[in-house]
Image (cartoon, rainbow, N blue to C red):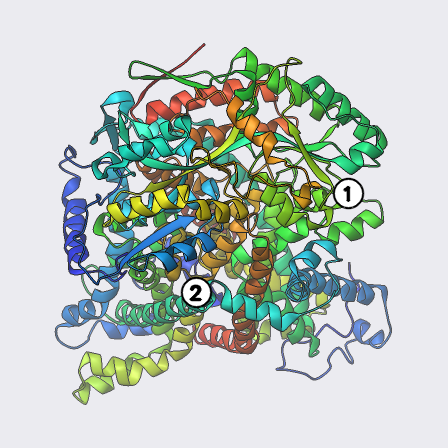
């Protein structure tokens, strides 16, 4: 990365910027100005004996993986910087850095956010650096998350196939069978409420629209599709309504605790047994381990409950890629690192320990650190459940370039809904309307599906 | 309520200490007794003190705890304290980045505050003693600057600075910190009242140039106002959050406020950061709290002097 | 909140807003200044230049640039609009878009409601504390003054982190204690969270405003108190009839700065946001603009929202000033 002090070049830019600002008012036709990232990727010549330094932003604690790389690759040193997770500040930082022209070389970007990064020209076209040859090393649907217009823009890292985490000890104590359908899930919730001395089956987090999207994804909804050059938003559909109605009923009957998940209060309740289950992603294992250490050995994992008995529908929550942001001076080396960090066996094992998710590398599961009985889950080979879940994810789900804003609207509406202002179902209608407005405001073509 | 509050009713008139109220008829009569109104008053003052001090006390207690105890023990009492360990964690985490943040905060607030004070002093003096064309316009602009919310400007400033390549540099925080319309305002008022024209005239007769007069004579006269302006500006910059938030993306340039919120928002994946956030918050309010207490007298006397002369 | 005030200025911000700008009150300096040495303009501008240059650079230029940006929009092309894009003239469409967004309008309603409640409560508390401490002649006064003033030294974000811990059920010792006596208030609920934010702001600034008022009281000529005493007024009467009216300039000033501060509301709700689903991404105008710029990447819309915010803020603070001034004048 370059230094912060204004260099001569930045001072020059400063001068022209000021001049532009001063003279702009009369000449309001600002054509020719580019959108988004203010610096584009260019490969700097490599000089022998000169170390290349790469900066890598992520919110997964992958320091050990990076240490391993730095030990084995003395010529390319990676500096890992921990940033706030996604919309909690991470993406804001990245966009801000892209605009300022000093983005890091590498950054963790979730799949749903990739179209938004495309919109600001934030990603390096990796096809130009030979990325297409790497395709075979990855799970196809995850690889395709980073392909736009036939060009590769990012290296997939991990996904989040979902399952049901539950407290086996308390389920046994209260005589609850592990639910296989959502109807049984509701029954279980009623039993917990009746017998659990203030406990509830799980929490409903109005702050987690990505989780809610995954629930709709499992049921077969498709929130985003495209027709020609038009984005079509379809959140207000019957299947999503059913999901919303289901959770609204659980909330109304006081069967779930309404609160933000992954918060200190939520962790405290997992720890004390006030919350005894979590419909969560594979990467949630590390969160449970780290934040509810007292409950070790008592958790198990079961497949996601189904809408129809005997079905095998799954969903995915989260999923990240290692992107090479626009403006890097070492895209070749960055791509080399990105591929290594996501496919090297040792690296994957270290990533898994850090809770990075379900590997995007093809055939990474068997024989890895994931493929072992785990004492925290009472010796269960719990990742077998997630492996099956991963295979069952319907991979035709698409994201819009305004996912962040869509989630924001849903979160705002859900927040009001659980406070008695409107309902979960009407939230979907409102969020859909706003999602279309957002797309239009960005100069895109968009409409509602219905 | 017509009951006076005996004992506290005091004659601000006099300067300090002597117990008053004596021999003031009604009030004096119940001077030493414990009356309901006095109890009420003491209760009110005590509750107010509890309210203002409680969060700080909680912070002191919390800064001694481990992450587990932070969430798993009663918040207002100590539990298995290991304070030094926590503090050394704060300063050593991530290659000692907290030191950098501290340094940056001092840089932004110290240098920014000092330069802002100097510029404000000079400008305020000029506005107070000279009659020149454009004076009205400048002064109205300053007044508008005082009344415009600084955060409404931060975003426009970010747009402009990023166009100029200044975003994500330390200048992006430092430059706006050097401008204090309110400081100019204050200095102008103060200079009008505290710098006698005769002194200026006398100096001019002696052949001193305007700059020389300012730096040798006026600066000293304006010291109380300058100190006040510096304190306001220092605290304002030290506490600022929005400007560094929008301007900076490189965490080695962060001030403490921004650094701590970064820790806090990453804490759900890294539970140890909860403790570091609390410990860091504790460390970061120490210097300013100390300054508040020590300088309190100075703030007040600075203020009062100005007004007496004005 | 940036810097703030003190007694002296209290009087003058008042006066100047009347348009008495030029002469101000330093009539001595004014009169003398008229016959000063040669080339005063050059000297004056020499003194002013550094400040004026920076002022133009950090106030005038950004606003001009924001207005310019608010008139632009991206025009997209390529597959699904993800291809190349260029910037075109948008007219006032960003403004109509901002004003059509219910969330953005609601955020103004919210901060206005906040201001109407929080500012009077805080100033009342500050005034009462000031009046009481002003009459307290023991050394307790200085201890209490320091205690009340202390939170001013705690940055807003840190204050919010602290109070955040005190608001969350299961972590907060306050809720622990209240729970033991059967009370379970929800500090982070849909209807209560705004007042929890207000509490943080009061905590931060009440002591500071108190100090401003005390300074004003100390500046009042002591003969007035003597006169009141001779008239037989007791401490309460003196406080209400003599001190309070004389503290008016300080109150006006703290009032103006509180209004400005309220419109800037940002750090407190942002820090409390992860703790509750009831603080939205557009909870305050500032949050909304920030969110548009950095999360939605629509800097043109964000620029329009910033301009609207600056406009509303100026109208309100100037409006408040001229209102109290007119009132003050008619009373005189």
- Judging depth in this view, the residue of C86 and A280 nearest the camera is A280
Q: CA distance from mark 1 to mark 2?
A: 39 Å
The location of residue B40, given as percent across then percent down, is: 80, 62
Whether residue C77 sits left or right of residue B52 in the image: it is left
Q: Disc 1 on helix, strand or loop?
A: loop
Can you say whether B193 is above or below A125 in the image? below
Residue C278 badge: none
From the image, tell me which residue sits under label 2: B101
Residue in view at x 27 percent, y 32 percent: A132
Can you say whether B14 is above or below A438 in the image? below
* Protein chain holding label 1: C
Give the image quarter of residue A380.
top right
| Neighbours of disc 1 within 10 Å: few (<14), some (14-19), many (20+) | few
Can you say whether B116 is above or below B205 in the image? above
The location of residue A143, given as percent across then percent down, is: 37, 30
From the image, tell me which residue sits under label 1: C184
- Judging depth in this view, the residue of A414 and B303 nearest the camera is A414
């Amino acid at each position: 990365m370059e230094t912060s002090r204004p260099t001569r070049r930045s001072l020059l830019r400063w001068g022209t910027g000021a001049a532009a600002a001063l003279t702009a008012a009369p000449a309001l036709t600002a054509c020719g100005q580019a959108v988004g990232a203010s610096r584009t990727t260019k490969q700097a010549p490599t000089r022998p004996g000169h170390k290349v330094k790469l900066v890598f932003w992520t919110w997964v604690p992958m320091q050990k993986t990076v240490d391993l790389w730095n030990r084995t690759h003395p010529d390319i040193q990676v500096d890992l910087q921990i940033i706030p997770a996604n919309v909690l500040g991470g993406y804001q930082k990245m966009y801000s850095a892209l605009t300022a022209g000093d983005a890091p070389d590498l950054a963790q970007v979730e799949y749903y956010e990739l179209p938004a990064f495309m919109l600001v020209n934030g990603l390096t076209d990796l096809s130009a650096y030979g990325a297409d040859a790497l395709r075979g090393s990855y799970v196809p649907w995850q690889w395709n998350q980073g392909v736009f217009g036939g060009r590769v823009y990012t290296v997939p890292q991990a996904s989040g196939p979902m399952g049901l985490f539950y407290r086996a000890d308390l389920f046994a104590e209260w005589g609850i069978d592990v639910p296989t359908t959502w109807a049984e899930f509701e029954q279980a919730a009623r039993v917990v409420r009746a017998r659990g001395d203030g406990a509830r089956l799980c929490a409903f987090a109005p702050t987690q629209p990505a989780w809610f999207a995954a629930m709709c994804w499992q049921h077969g909804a498709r929130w985003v599709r495209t027709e020609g050059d038009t984005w079509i938003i379809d959140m207000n559909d019957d299947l999503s309504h059913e999901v919303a109605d289901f959770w609204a009923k659980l909330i109304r009957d006081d069967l779930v605790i309404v609160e933000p998940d992954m918060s200190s209060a939520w962790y405290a309740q997992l720890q004390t047994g006030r919350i005894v289950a979590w419909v969560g992603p594979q990467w949630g294992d590390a969160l449970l381990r780290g934040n509810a250490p007292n409950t070790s050995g008592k958790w198990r994992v079961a497949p996601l409950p189904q809408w129809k008995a005997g079905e095998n529908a799954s969903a995915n929550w989260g999923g990240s890629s290692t992107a090479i942001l626009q403006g890097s001076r070492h895209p070749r080396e960055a791509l080399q690192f990105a591929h290594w960090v996501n496919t090297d066996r040792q690296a994957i094992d270290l990533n898994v320990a850090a809770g990075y998710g379900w590997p995007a590398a093809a055939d990474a599961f068997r024989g890895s650190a994931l493929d072992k009985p785990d004492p925290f889950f009472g010796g269960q080979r719990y990742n077998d459940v997630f492996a099956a879940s991963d295979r069952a994810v319907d991979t035709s789900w698409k994201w819009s370039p305004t996912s962040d804003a869509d989630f924001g609207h849903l979160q705002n509406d859900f927040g009001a809904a659980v406070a008695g202002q409107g309902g979960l179902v009407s939230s979907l209608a409102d969020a859909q309307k706003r999602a279309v407005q957002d797309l239009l405001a960005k100069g895109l073509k968009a409409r509602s599906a219905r | 309520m017509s009951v006076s509050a005996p004992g506290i009713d005091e004659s601000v008139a006099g300067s300090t200490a002597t117990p008053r109220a004596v021999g003031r008829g009604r009030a004096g009569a119940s001077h030493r007794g414990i009356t309901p109104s006095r109890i009420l008053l003491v209760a009110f003052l005590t509750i107010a003190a509890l309210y203002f001090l409680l969060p700080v006390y909680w912070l002191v207690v919390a800064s001694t705890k481990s992450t587990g105890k932070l969430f798993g023990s009663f918040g207002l009492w100590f539990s298995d304290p290991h304070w030094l360990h926590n503090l050394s964690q704060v300063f050593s985490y991530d290659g000692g980045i907290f030191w950098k943040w501290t340094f940056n905060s001092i840089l932004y607030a110290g240098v920014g505050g000092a330069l802002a004070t100097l510029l404000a002093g000079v400008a305020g003096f000029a506005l107070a003693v000279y009659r020149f064309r454009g004076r009205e316009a400048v002064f109205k602009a300053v007044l508008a600057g005082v009344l415009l919310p600084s955060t409404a400007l931060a975003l426009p400033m970010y747009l402009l600075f990023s166009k100029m390549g200044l975003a994500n540099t330390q200048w992006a925080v430092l430059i706006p910190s050097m401008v204090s319309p309110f400081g100019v305002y204050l200095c102008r008022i103060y200079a009008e009242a505290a710098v006698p024209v005769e002194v200026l005239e006398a100096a001019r007769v002696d052949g001193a140039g305007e700059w020389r007069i300012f730096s040798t004579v006026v600066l000293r006269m304006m010291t109380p106002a300058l100190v006040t302006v510096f304190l306001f500006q220092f605290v304002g910059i030290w506490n600022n959050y929005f400007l560094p938030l929008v301007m900076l993306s490189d965490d080695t340039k962060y001030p403490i406020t921004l650094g701590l919120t970064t820790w806090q928002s990453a804490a759900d994946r890294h539970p140890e950061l909860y403790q570091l956030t609390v410990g860091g918050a504790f460390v970061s309010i120490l210097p300013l709290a100390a300054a508040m207490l020590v300088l309190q007298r100075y703030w007040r006397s600075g203020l009062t002097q100005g007004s007496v002369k004005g | 909140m940036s810097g703030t005030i003190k007694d002296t200025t209290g009087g003058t911000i008042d006066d100047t807003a009347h348009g008495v700008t030029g002469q101000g009150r330093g009539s001595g300096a004014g009169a003398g200044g008229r016959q000063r040495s040669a080339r005063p303009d050059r000297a004056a501008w020499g003194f002013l230049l550094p400040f004026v240059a920076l002022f133009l650079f950090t106030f005038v230029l950004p606003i001009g640039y924001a207005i310019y940006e608010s008139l632009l929009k991206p025009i997209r092309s390529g597959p699904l609009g993800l291809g190349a894009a260029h910037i075109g003239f948008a007219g006032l469409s960003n403004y109509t878009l901002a004003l059509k967004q219910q969330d953005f309008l609601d955020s103004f309603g919210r901060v206005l409601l906040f201001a109407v409640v929080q500012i009077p409560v805080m100033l009342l508390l500050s005034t009462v504390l000031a009046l009481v401490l002003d009459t307290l002649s023991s050394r307790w006064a200085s201890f209490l003054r320091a205690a009340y003033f202390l939170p001013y030294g705690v940055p807003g974000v840190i204050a919010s982190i602290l109070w955040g811990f005190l608001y969350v059920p299961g972590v907060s010792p306050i809720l622990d204690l209240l729970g033991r006596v059967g009370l379970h208030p929800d500090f982070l609920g849909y209807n209560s969270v705004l007042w929890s934010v207000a509490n943080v702001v009061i905590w931060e600034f009440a002591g500071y405003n108190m100090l401003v008022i005390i300074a004003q009281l100390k500046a009042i000529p002591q003969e007035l108190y003597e006169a009141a005493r001779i008239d037989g007024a007791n401490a309460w009467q003196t406080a209400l009839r003599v001190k309070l009216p004389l503290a008016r300039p300080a109150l006006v000033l703290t009032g103006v700065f509180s209004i400005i501060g309220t419109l800037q509301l940002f750090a407190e709700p942002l820090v409390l946001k992860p703790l509750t689903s009831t603080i939205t991404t557009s909870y305050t105008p500032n949050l909304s603009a920030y969110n548009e710029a950095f999360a939605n990447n629509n800097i043109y819309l964000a620029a329009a929202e910033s301009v609207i915010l600056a406009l509303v803020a100026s109208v309100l603070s100037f409006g408040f000033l001229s209102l109290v001034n007119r009132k003050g004048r008619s009373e005189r």
